Image (cartoon, rainbow, N blue to C red):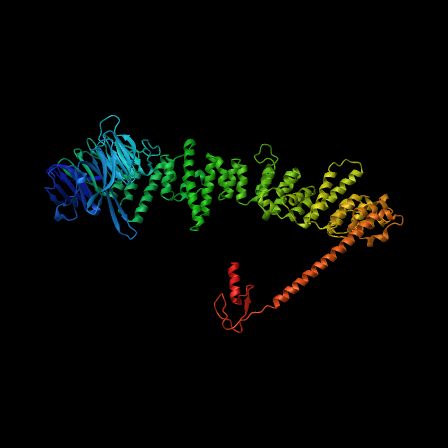
Amino acid sequence: MHTAYSVQSILKQGVQIEAITAFGNHVILGTRSGQLIMYSVENQTDVDMRMFNKNFSKKPITQMEVVAAENLLFVLTDNMIHVCDVSRIENNFEFMHSSVETKGCTLFTMDVDTRKSITGEVATFIRIGCAIKRRLILFFWKKDKLASLELAIELLDVPKAMCWVNQLICVGYKDEYVLYDISYNPPKMHKLIRTSSTISQEPNICLIRNSMLGISKDNYLMLIDLGQYKAIDNNVDTGMNRTTLTQWSSPLLALVWDEPFAVGRTKNTIEVRSLVGKDTLVQSIPELKNTRFLVRSDKGIIFAAASSELWCIRLVDIGMQRQELLQQKKFQLAIELTEISEEDGVDKAQTIRQIRMLYAKELFTNKEFAAAMKEFEKAAIDPYDVIRLFPSLVPEPKNTSDAVVPPSSVPKLEDHDLENAYLALIEFLVQARQREVVKLLDTKSSSKSLLEIIDTTLLKCYLQTNDALVAPLLRLNQCHLEESEKMLKKHNKLSELIILYDGKKKHKKALTLLKEQANIQGSVLQGHKRTITYLQSLGSDNLPLIFEFADWVLTENPMEGLTIFTDELIAVEALPRAKVLDFLLSKHKALVIPYLEHIIFEWNDTNTLRHNALLKQYSEQVQRLLALQAKGEETPELQPLRAKMYKMLEESQHYSPDRVLDDFPTTVLLEERALILGRLKKHDEVLAIYIQVFGDVDKAKAYAEAKYEDDKEVFNILLLTILKPTQKPPYEGITLHPDFLRPNKEVAVDLLNTYTIKIDPTKIIEYLPDDIYMHELKNYFETVARTQMNESHQRKIMRGLLQAEAARLRASLAKEKNKSFEINESTLCPECRKRFTNQTAFVRYPNGQVVHLSCYDRVVSATQQ
């Protein structure tokens, strides 16, 4: 306990006090005989009666409220509200207004709201709620009189206490508290608590800190946070915060709030209590045990009154209180008092910071780590100074002469205490880190070194408390490399060590560790999947490193290792394919075909060189397999591979035929060679392969049909290949087909009869064999003759039609040329209504209208838009 308030006696004997109110240094008394008296208390000894109206009412004054901003005094007497002006002393409570509508009022409450308009004018809005029997009728002050808000609330009983805050009105009945929300129409009722569970107790309601509602229950003061209140019909709101309880020595009889103290009248004394901390009793004033009324006037000034006595309770100098509180280690209360002091802003902030540091020190010493960290945060302490409280977390011994808490006073932490301290430090450092990151982004200051210290310390804490948080922290990439590396190795956190190396771009270290651990049984890094994933993420800038460490993976597991270069990832797809191909050709040639197949068929690569390369690989592999087959070995993969090669030669449009042709031998793979020659439009060589080598007329016909649209001579070439066979094979080492060593009359006749209109008789007739009978060619020649005659007839008809059309056009042109029109000085343009001059360019419409060329252009432009 300490002395927070001093007591000054103002009035000892005299009038019978029935009501009291105050503002500033003034206190107004209402007496049993209906008198109004105002005293001014300037200091500890100077008391002056300023106004006295002995005939204000014939009945007792039962309640008063003053609105200092408007110099208005609202008085309840004879069950009616009267309003007085207290601005001028000489007028002795000048009467302004009596509200007949308030007749029958037994209790009233007020809501005073001061607002600033856009123009800067300050206006005060006054609302009054009058309890008339079991109804609460609402009024507002307008133009020197009370006007009805046209809103009434049906009450459960006659109220004993009321408090109006914004849109909420708390009413205390003899047995319960109820909250009414007038923002709804009709107002919503919300039951709070009973006034007492054991005794008969008058309700007490007080507004605390402008947002909390203080209500009394038994020996407790209960706080309700109105900011969290949500109106729900007839239900207790589970979201309402009313867990804060302050115990008093006996039930409260009256209560006022004077920041930071709650001053309450109990049975035997007036108690001053703080709402923070464990020991809430600040001061007891037993000499005022007979008081009936308590009213707050201004900051640090409270008036207390008995039936015929009056006291002024003044707040003791804050500096003196603070000194006493610091000696008693009541830091929270010292902070609250300093916050309301009138000290200079900078000095006040510095003082509060120093108190918070002392408070945090005390909390830490008492092993209240979470609370200590919150105070350190409020004091905006350097995070490194807090870290120094934990010697095991500091990398190297530091000079601790300026430490927040001297090492000698730091408690030795072990086991559960140490874990709790780490958890509290983690929460503190996480918030400190967020602030430092914001500073770094805003370029207000360079905090990379501090971030490094914070993250490294967090890493050590996580390793001790919750290692699941280690990996997310390391991905933030601010930890000190060597220190973190040492800690992770100590705790065998190899997977997290890889994340650290990755974040610090120490890729070679990471990949070396992955390679070392790959074949260690039981290691978290066993296998090659982690290496593959790591290599896939490196990108083109680290291509030499990718090749270096992909080598061992491709050796141990070629197909899975190939995903380093073929997985469906942006970074992988962006790797330079030419360099990857060169690497595979030099080190892992067996993977060249799968790699090229993937980039061509899956990624739709259209590069000619890579298409050529894949065809070359196909050719080499097929030739190798053919050689093995010739030796009698089984080659099940030969046919599928050759089918893929044939399909690519047939369908791909991106390889270079002349370049690919060099990779195909002339003794084998002739079908494939024919496809390539076809791309080069060497029809004679293709047809020679199909006819003279394979003797495959159907394939030759199919080829000719496919190429006929591009080259009308292809069927002539086919027929000549059959009628004029060469005696020399097209390629060395090739045996000619026996059916086509001499002219094959049957095949030739079949072609002539099948493709009659596609074979020119003038080019092949001289090559027909002498032993062909004319009746065998009858169908061919008849068809040719009919076709030629038909084409000649069609040409004659078309010529006649074109001549007729030309004659019609000439006649139409002559007719148009014969048309004439006259333009003179009276002719007006229908668009602009202006005349034509000698030099004017004009346009004549088909309907005969003539307009300026410029007008015509303007109309055309407008139409197009």
Which residue appears at 68% of the width and 63% of the height? 807
User: In this rendering, is residue 34 above or below 196?
Assistant: below
User: In this rendering, is residue 670 above or below 762?
Assistant: above
Left or right: 54, with 431 as reference point? left
* Residue toward you, 648 or 618: 648
* Residue toward you, 557 or 746: 746
Q: Which image quadrant for residue 808?
A: bottom right
Figure label count? 0
Among all residues in the image, which is located at the extreme top?
198
Q: Position of residue 190 (x, y in %)?
A: 30, 33
* Residue toward you, 190 or 798: 798
Q: Which image quadrant for residue 138?
A: top left
Q: Is residue 224 visible?
A: yes
Left or right: 361, with 546 as reference point? left
Which residue appears at 49% of the width and 69% of the height? 828
Q: Position of residue 689 (x, y in %)?
A: 80, 47
Q: Position of residue 22 (x, y in %)?
A: 19, 42
Q: Is residue 364 visible?
A: no
Among all residues in the image, which is located at the extreme right?
771
User: In this rendering, is residue 83 above or below 788?
Assistant: above
Q: Which image quadrant for residue 595?
A: top right
Quadrant (top left/top right/bottom left/bottom right) for the N terminus: top left
Q: Position of residue 768 (x, y in %)?
A: 86, 50
